Amino acid sequence: MSRVCELLSIRYPIIQGGMGNISSPILASAVSEAGGLGTLGTGTLDPDKVEGLILDMKERTSKPFALNIPITVTGHLKEIGELAITHEIPVVSLSAGNPAPYIPYLKEKGIIVICVTASVKHAVKAEKAGADLVVGEGFEAAGINSHLEITTMTLIPQLATNVSIPVIAAGGIGDGRGLAAALALGADGVQLGTRLIATKESPYHKHYMERILNANDTDTVIVGRRAGKVRRILKTSYADRLQEAEANEMNPEEFERLTGEDRHSVGAIEGRLDEGFLNGGQISGLLTTTPTVVELFEEMIVDAFRILETQAATCKKFT
Ligand SMILES: Cc1cc2nc3c(=O)[nH]c(=O)nc-3n(C[C@H](O)[C@H](O)[C@H](O)COP(=O)(O)O)c2cc1C
């Protein structure tokens, strides 16, 4: 059993990434039931709405799950932290901001803390502040991304070298090959975002899923460099509009309005692709099927095991 599985009381070292305002207990409970760690994102949602999601999640599964709090995005940091404590949620993942001030309080309440980082410096700081696990999220990933633009391939081995707590690789992982690669780079497990959108349990609009399934390797774009909030999204008519707005130097406040979480819900849930965007990672180009979450995880584990065994046998021939 990997140390991540032991720490989180899960069967497979696979974590669902937070999914902001479109987080769904349907998908998150499917992940937990399948043996991974489901996550409810909180995005910019009101505490009442988040509490509703937590109660719904608890009706669907008694397995462990996490609450993701994007520090600089939520307008309700304190209230949502308190909800995690009141509802005895076993794991909180902190992203999009400096987690150090909040880790000791959550730990004191018995919560396992995951910190999502995109550089060695931030991972080392999170470990020093008491984090139990770090997620290393590379630039391939969907959604809000780091301006540092470090890729998963280069970030993960550097994190594994520089921290002693478990490292979870995020960004660009879509199958057993990705899992095997992450483990080979020194990760203890993986976090998935894009891959989970294209599953049977995914409750999002069919246009979102179709866009992922039809994407190729170049069908995502980065927006927000100019406004200072970098985001990877799928190419759509709305993405073209955002790129045009940036090229025309739209003022940052107006641009932020066009890339707010509500605009993501319009694209992802309502399927209005002219009026809202779709978070999507570079791995979209690999995805052509919609397995159930159980099928996905089982195939990933079996394939990763087979790949690592085959590679070990190949390497043995060289020694
Ligand atoms: C729809 C969607 C919404 C996301 N929202 C959040 C979020 O609110 N908080 C966060 O930390 N990460 C968020 N992410 C990033 C994921 O948690 C995850 O780290 C990332 O998707 C992994 O890369 P991948 O997309 O290549 O699998 C989001 C990703 C997606 C696909």
Image (cartoon, helix red, strand yellow):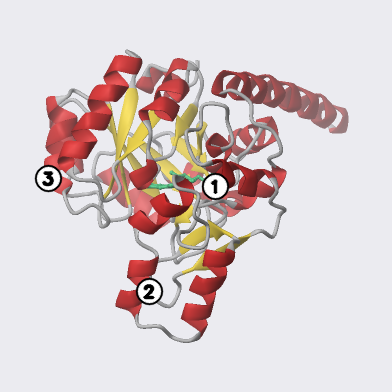
Of helix, strand and loop, which one carries label 3? helix
Residue under numbered circle 1: 171
Hey, which residue is sitting farthest bottom in the picture? 248
- Vertical arrangement, residue 153 with respect to residue 239, above or below: above
Q: Position of residue 267 (x, y in %)?
A: 47, 53
**In the rendered structure, are the residues bearing label 2 and label 3 in contact, judged by CB atoms less than 8 Å apart?**
no
Q: How many marks?
A: 3
- Locate the C terminus and report the quarter of the image it occupies: top right
Residue 272 located left or right of residue 100: right
Tag 3: amino acid = Lys
Pick the residue in front: 68 or 7.
Answer: 68
Tag 2: amino acid = Phe
Image point (57%, 31%), residue name: 199
Residue under numbered circle 3: 78
Residue 125 located left or right of residue 264: left
Point out which mark residue 255 bears. 2
Estimate how packed mark 2 is, as few (under 14), some (14 to 19) or many (20 or more) residues with alpha carbons within 10 Å.
some
Q: Position of residue 135 (x, y in %)?
A: 43, 42
Of helix, strand and loop, which one carries label 2? helix
Q: Is mark 1 within 8 Å of ligand 1?
A: yes
Image point (12%, 45%), residue name: 78
